[in-house]
Image: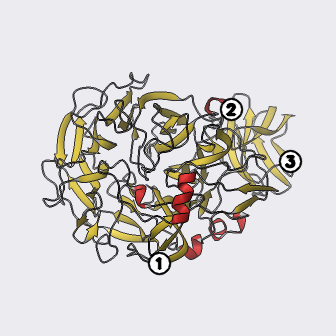
Amino acid sequence: MKKLLLFALALSFVSVGIAQVRQISPKAWYSTVKDVKPMKIAEQEITFQVEINPTVASDRAMDVVVGETWYDLQSNSTMANRIYAFDDGTIATTWTRGMESPPSCPDRGTGYNYFNGTSWGAYPTARIEATRTGWPNISPYGVNGEITCAHSGGADGLIFSWRENKGTGDWNYFNLPGPAALPELLWPRMITSGENNEVIHVFACAGNAATYEDLTMALLYSRSSDGGQTWDPENAILDGMGTDHTNGWGGDDYAWAQPLGDTLAFIAFGGVKDGIVMKSTDGGDNWERILFYESVAPFYTMGDVLPNYGGGDSYNAAVIDDEGIVHIAFGRQIHMADEAGSYYYPYSDGLIYWNETMAPLDTAMIQSYILPDDWTTTNLYQSGNLAAWVQPNGNDTIVGVAPYYASLSSMPQLVFHRDEFGQKIIQIFYSALSLGFVHDGNQTNYRHVWGRFTEVDGSYSDFVDYTGDVFHLFSECVFPSVAQVMPDDKYHILYQTDLIPGNSLQPSTGPSHDPVKNNMVYLKVSPLAVDIDETSVSSFEISQNIPNPAVNNTRIMVSSKTAGVIKLTVSNILGQVVHQQSVDNSSPVHTFNVNVSNLDSGIYFYTVEIGNSSVTKKMLVN
């Protein structure tokens, strides 16, 4: 068995944890709001029960760098919609770009690049807005257009940039200020809905650490169907998000799901107070409050005393499936509070999954351990709510953690689709600490972009490290944003990468490293490990394997109208062939007997080929 010793991130971080420094106010330019969450170092020995070598993904395309930035804080927590894949095969990407005088970057604004179906454009040389902005979102707008939304950090509130034809032409602009008493709207989240994506929906935070309608950093909802000329509602606090339920929110602790017709969903969870989904089935006229995390302190204020308890890390994601059910994910984090303030444990791990058919979570379900000796014994694992955790890798250990104020497995993104068998799939992408990948200078582990999926049955596919190949040995891969639409049946990912773990803006008391240039990377991933071209023909049929799930042996029957060679291939989720058989068959029915006793538990695909035709089915091995 291996033992991992958790080390302090740095001497300054240790002093924060031991001295229990009070909460501090963020700086005026909103580089971060997470300074309100001082760290507490957990001194704990962790044992992994088994040694597993994660396998590098074989189902990913080559990285494509679409732009650069020195401003390397893409979000304080939850990611906005930064990438959109259009039905015609084109793709638009956005990010917070800053190239001058880092880390503050006075030229900061929306970086934009576009894939026209054949190639990407050149790296942008300037922001798309006329003034300094940050935190962009992108959505389709109109029949063939696009729209972005970012905050100005001043009285102009939110800046919207749009054009009639995506990828080309001049940008047009309008803005949305906050209420007269507080015009400074910050950290927006925007989507569009309607037949031609003409309805704009936006949530934003009312100021930085400011009070509005008795809420600290109130979340305000606005909607426009005429290009921002009028808003109805405008800067409204929705029922369920007001003082009856909370005393405030936090910047970036919220996210939209991609709309499904008139069904809209929005998640808000700061990790300590109640976690909620706001859902509308009539395009935003009426909203339902759905509780997914019941807090021990929904009205927490500075000075409240709380023992260690399990909550979230403010990195959230949501998706709506084709039946209108909302699915969410968030990073698991352990908190505590005393008279001096609230704290979190930076070695907290676990990525949590929930959908609205489940009962609300609470600290009794999440529990207060930092890392367990065996994840399979935990409530979350046994209930199907544990989506991911840091994967062991031979004898490698956790060396150090660069602070993003996140769980070791966090920054989730969710995508829904149905596979070729019609099975519902929730694909989960996330950024996680990756053992064996360490920066020699600051002695911290790199984060990689990982993924796995669930069929919403409590079980999950294998873990896949999408950036664990030789080209990413020294890459910090963070802030993934994934398009929730899949017009080409592929996942489209945008993430930020540089060569040093952490960033140059967090924490403000001593950032992880000096500014360095970051790449914004586009990555396309197939839902399956290997793309399978299947031709369903009436000349032969294959049965579902029996038994399924298989334990030691399983049988697959092939009914064929023609004689010839029948080839059976069994592959794992990574596309690796684990078993092959072939027979020169002349009878109308042939049965393959497959010994699976040497295979690991999980999902496998078996393909039967006769001539140029093939049929693939899925099986489970226990």
Q: Camera-side residue: 614 or 480?
A: 480
> Which amino acid type is shown beneath numbered disc 3?
Asn
SS of the residue at dot 1? Answer: loop
Up/down of 536 relative to 264, above or below: above
The label nearer to you, 1 versus 3, is 1
Circles 1 and 3: CB atoms closer than 8 Å: no
Q: Camera-side residue: 74 or 320?
A: 74
Q: Camera-side residue: 102 or 79?
A: 102
Which of the numbered marks, if any, corresponds to residue 54? none
Q: Position of residue 595 (x, y in %)?
A: 87, 49
Residue, x 39% and y 31% (percent of image)? 90
Residue, x 54% and y 59% (percent of image)? 15
Query: What's the CA distance linking mark 1 and mark 3?
Result: 62 Å
Quadrant showing the N terminus: bottom right
Quadrant showing the C terminus: bottom right
- The residue tagged 3 is 593
- The residue tagged 1 is 305
> Which amino acid type is shown beneath numbered disc 2?
Ser
- The residue tagged 2 is 613
Residue, x 41% and y 60% (percent of image)? 36
